[in-house]
Image (spheres, rainbow, N blue to C red):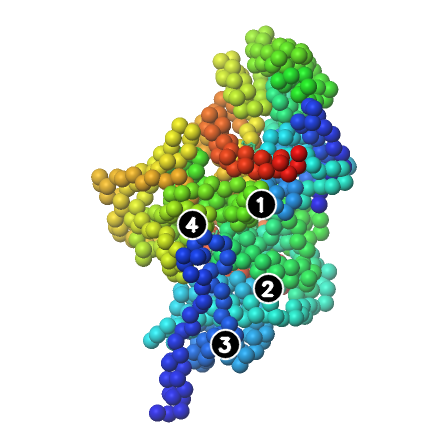
Amino acid sequence: MAEEEVKKAKKEAIPRQKMPEQAPEVRRRNFKEVPTGYTPETAMLEAQRCLQCKKPGCVDGCPVQVDIPGFINHIKEGNFTEAARLLWQKNSLPAVCGRVCPQEVQCEGVCIVGKKGQPVAIGNLERFAADYERINGKGELPPKAPPTGKKIAVVGSGPSGLTVAGDLIAKGHEVTVLEAFHKPGGVLVYGIPEFRLPKEIVFSEVAFMERQGVKLECNSVVGRTVTLDELFAQGYDAVYVGVGAGLPTFMNIPGENLIGVLSANEYLTRANLMKAYLFPEYDTPIVKGKNVVVLGAGNVAMDSARTAMRLGADNVKIVYRRSRQEMPARAAEIHHAEEEGIEFFLLTAPTRFLGNEKGRITGMECLKMELGEPDQSGRRRPIPVKGSEFKMDCDLVIVAVGAGANPLLTQSTPELSLNKRGYIIADPETGKTTKKGVWAGGDIVTGSATVILAMGAGRKAADSIHNYLKWGW
Amino acid sequence: MFKIVKREEMAGGTVILNEIEAPLIAQKAKPGQFVILKANETGERIPLTMADTDPQKGTITVIYMIVGKSTALFKTLKVGEGYKDVIGPLGKPTHVEKVGTVVCVGGGTGVAVLHPIARALKEAGNHVIAVIGARNKGLLILEEQMKAASNELHVCTDDGSYGHHGFVTEVLKKMLETKDVKLVVGIGPVPMMKFVSKMTKEFNVKTLVSLNPIMIDGTGMCGGCRVSIGGETKFACVDGPEFDGHLVDYDGLMQRLQAYCDEEKECYGTFCKLNP
Ligand SMILES: Cc1cc2nc3c(=O)[nH]c(=O)nc-3n(C[C@H](O)[C@H](O)[C@H](O)COP(=O)(O)OP(=O)(O)OC[C@H]3O[C@@H](n4cnc5c(N)ncnc54)[C@H](O)[C@@H]3O)c2cc1C
Ligand SMILES: Cc1cc2nc3c(=O)[nH]c(=O)nc-3n(C[C@H](O)[C@H](O)[C@H](O)COP(=O)(O)OP(=O)(O)OC[C@H]3O[C@@H](n4cnc5c(N)ncnc54)[C@H](O)[C@@H]3O)c2cc1C
Ligand code: SF4
Ligand code: FES
């Protein structure tokens, strides 16, 4: 055997390092993070599995083209700080992305090692490097360009807005982030639960940006407290709109206003942002269901189901009208949910909610479905099976069937052109909208997507804003 | 922090007035809009209507009744202390135009919500007849202010300890029978708004009510505040809080207001024990 091949064979002999996790029986009743993270030793071992390909598939698979072999090589050498720095070049929130990216359809999905066996655990390594640096690093501020005297307002403090803020402050501009809620972070804080993404990580990222000079103004509902035109009148030179897809979707079936039928947005906001899982230490209450039904099968549905389990449910059912293959959640979330005892009722759709005389939900009527021809989304269309009606008892229903564009800001800014569904039209390369000096990106442009895509859009817009401030629209 | 610059106890300490520094909100707020307040880190987000604003001073005024843990906690805040978060102005402003004779009916703390609306309607050139009520004289609020904000003021108490002995709807009925009323604005407890609307329906007079469902974000993001209006689901925080009184499903609203009553009792009970 040639020396190269010996090296390769040795690498292949190292199995993918397992992520240590809290046991399912334990974690299903607590809100602590599920995976506990690699140790430096496991991280270095896992890093050895990377072939350092000349033409790496993973980099193309990553929406922001992180230098994956590069940062993995630093981990292999034990240079964790260097690894984190390299990650930051392309991704300002690696500790978040390592935890929530759908790696199986991105970097890891096209990893060469994965062709024969299991792909390199890129997400776990990304998380490791970022966590290591956050906990052990000196917290040195990145270099900042000399002040330009230009002022930028960023509306919304989700991953997309935070990326724009981080990029533009480094380029020497003054940046103010306006956030409607009383806490920054967007979905990372109000939507994704503590057991999947500890809030302390998000707040530490935000605090880091504040140390770099980003100003944060919470409790600012743009469109109400202040309008985009008023921001320009106050002297801002450019505005980035990253307000997310904050409009709940309901099923439009009878009984939807019964007590105990909640949008996932409401349920998760109560649980996460308002910390209702710590009620009565925190004042906000939440419905603690015993027989819980979650409608939908995306990440939002998995998060709702697993939250309900942690709040003491006897059983939690995911009810989804298509089959397992079409479930949009990350593979890891579905796996974790199943381990925690969440049941899946697939090819099932509710037709009405049933309540008692106090207006509380007691159950729902359902229909079985079968799959027909593919629809516009390319997924096979569910068709009701005649005569398959049945009843399901429940005392809490969480509706997690998607989100829409919240019109609060866009209604107050008629010059922003919207598409049919109410999302802002923006140039995919630059993020420019139809209103001069205004950029947009993230979920408010694409509809509900992913953290990394929202960040990618933010990065492109930041570059475009920087050019505009130098050269004009 | 949003500092409290003035604090008053009303209705024997069951109702509190806070004037709060919030310059941005004070500049933008219009009658009928509300704010969401959060006292501290662990607090709940509580919606309260602005009873007054002073754009020059940069302050807003809220008037609230103590009904549970959060309002009891608000009551403990002194002048110089403040709220951690105040968000607003939220909701659609009242549509104010000159229509002629308007009857403004307010019950309980609803009078606080009614006051800026009555004043705006009067300033717009309407003949404003105000009818305000409370269970007894001690619980009546803002009588002087309502007098100034209206052309005619009628006061009712359920027990007859002051003014007309009986419900506001009785006085309203007389007005509807004897005057050419173009618009009724009814704000107060849900049952009161329900009966006001039922009565004005008989007289076919347009009626506005202000709904108070449980809210969280106040920006149309959670759907928790949904109410059924003419069979259609609306979000009170962005589509309201004012709606056509003849279309509101009041029974549904009353039920939904009870969603967390067990938890609220527990929370309030503990708070009362700790803060006798
Ligand atoms: C429960 C849940 C789980 C998810 N899980 C994953 C996952 O595992 N992996 C993944 O990649 N993606 C996941 N997503 C999707 C991902 O979180 C979003 O795609 C991403 O957060 C979008 O980022 P954004 O910056 O565009 O908007 P958001 O994160 O929605 O942030 C928008 C911010 O703008 C604020 N805002 C809104 N209106 C205004 C206004 N008028 N004025 C001021 N501020 C305003 C909002 O309060 C919010 O803070 C999940 C989403 C949810 C809801
Ligand atoms: C748009 C709007 C404007 C309002 N304006 C005023 C006002 O000017 N003055 C005033 O005294 N009250 C007003 N209210 C009602 C006020 O918000 C509630 O009385 C308050 O939230 C009660 O909180 P608590 O913790 O003290 O009582 P709790 O014990 O929590 O609740 C007592 C009752 O208040 C209601 N309630 C509880 N939580 C909320 C919530 N988050 N949002 C709305 N209602 C809730 C429920 O029906 C509950 O049964 C308004 C409500 C809304 C929606
Ligand atoms: S950002 Fe997401 S896709 Fe890119 S390398 Fe990291 S985990 Fe993979
Ligand atoms: S309070 Fe959440 S949508 Fe109205």
The residues tagged by marks 1 and 4 sit, at their Cα atoms, a distance apart of 20 Å
Is the residue marked 2 within 8 Å of ligand 1, measured from its CB?
A: no
Specify whether disc 2 shares its chain with disc 1: yes
Q: Is residue A354 visible?
A: yes
Q: Which mark is residue A281?
A: 1
Which residue is at 71% across, 51% downward? A235
Say which chain tag 3 marks.
A
Say which chain tag 2 marks.
A
Q: Residues within 10 Å of mark 1 (few under 14, many from 20)?
A: few
The residue at which mark 2 appears reads as A463
Is the residue marked 4 within 8 Å of ligand 1, measured from its CB?
A: no
Q: Is residue A418 visible?
A: no
Q: Is residue B32 above or below residue A171?
A: above
The residues tagged by marks 3 and 4 sit, at their Cα atoms, a distance apart of 34 Å
**Callout 2 amino acid:** Asp
Q: Position of residue A414 (x, y in %)?
A: 57, 43
Q: Which comes sooner in the sequence, label 2 or label 1?
A: 1
The reply to whether dot 2 and dot 1 touch (C-beta < 8 Å) is no
Q: Quadrant of the C terminus of chain B?
A: top right
Which residue is at 70% across, 24% downward? B12
